[in-house]
Image (cartoon, rainbow, N blue to C red):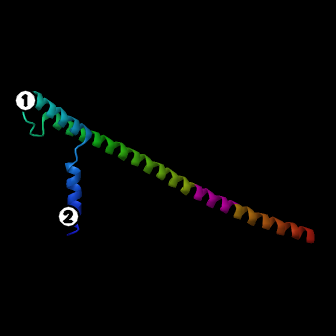
Amino acid sequence: MKPQYPIIFAVLALVACDGPKEKAGKEQDKAAASAAGQEYTGSGPAERAGEVQDKADAAARDAKKASADAIEAQAKNIKKQADVAAEKLESDADAVRDAAEKRADALEREAAKVRAQ
């Protein structure tokens, strides 16, 4: 069996799955056909409407998931920006400490020279 076949079967299985509203529509169509004394042949109007509603519901779920994913990505981006800003502040603080240390050392040397005179 080629590796493509399992993928094709999985896609076909998903396509063949009826959603809950499609199943309910199918039952309505069967009941209507039975009440009219006819045999249900499949794919009646309520079933098709249910299928459309199931697809709309799935699209809405996908849109919500995409929106949530976008918000999570935005949160991660904000955290990364905060990390970059914090690193810069830490670097600036180190530079200020180094400059202060050098200035303090120079003043201590100057004070030692004044004492030695």
Label 1 or label 2, whichever lies nearer to me, is 1
Q: Quadrant of residue 108?
A: bottom right
Label the magenta part by its dominant secondary structure. helix
Asked whether 61 falls inside the magenta stretch, the response is no
- Please rate how many residues cluster around mark 2, counting C-alpha atoms within 10 Å: few if below 14, some from 14 to 19, many from 20: few
Q: Three-letter amino acid code at disc 1? A: Gly
Residue 12 x %, y %: 19, 54
Between 39 and 96, the one lying in front of the other is: 39
The stretch in magenta equals: 86-96
Question: Is residue 117 in view?
Answer: no
Q: Quadrant of residue 88?
A: bottom right
Q: Residue at x 22, y 47 (%)?
A: 17
Q: Three-letter amino acid code at disc 2? A: Tyr
Residue 43 x %, y %: 12, 39
Residue carrying label 2? 5
Spatial distance from mark 1 to mark 2, Cα to Cα? 42 Å
Q: Residue at x 19, y 35 (%)?
A: 27
Q: Find numbered disc 1 in the image and state the secondary structure of the residue it sits on.
A: loop
Residue 37, numbered circle = 1
42 sits to left or right of 102: left
- Specify which label sits upstream in the sequence, 1 or 2: 2
27 sits to left or right of 115: left
Between 36 and 17, the one lying in front of the other is: 36
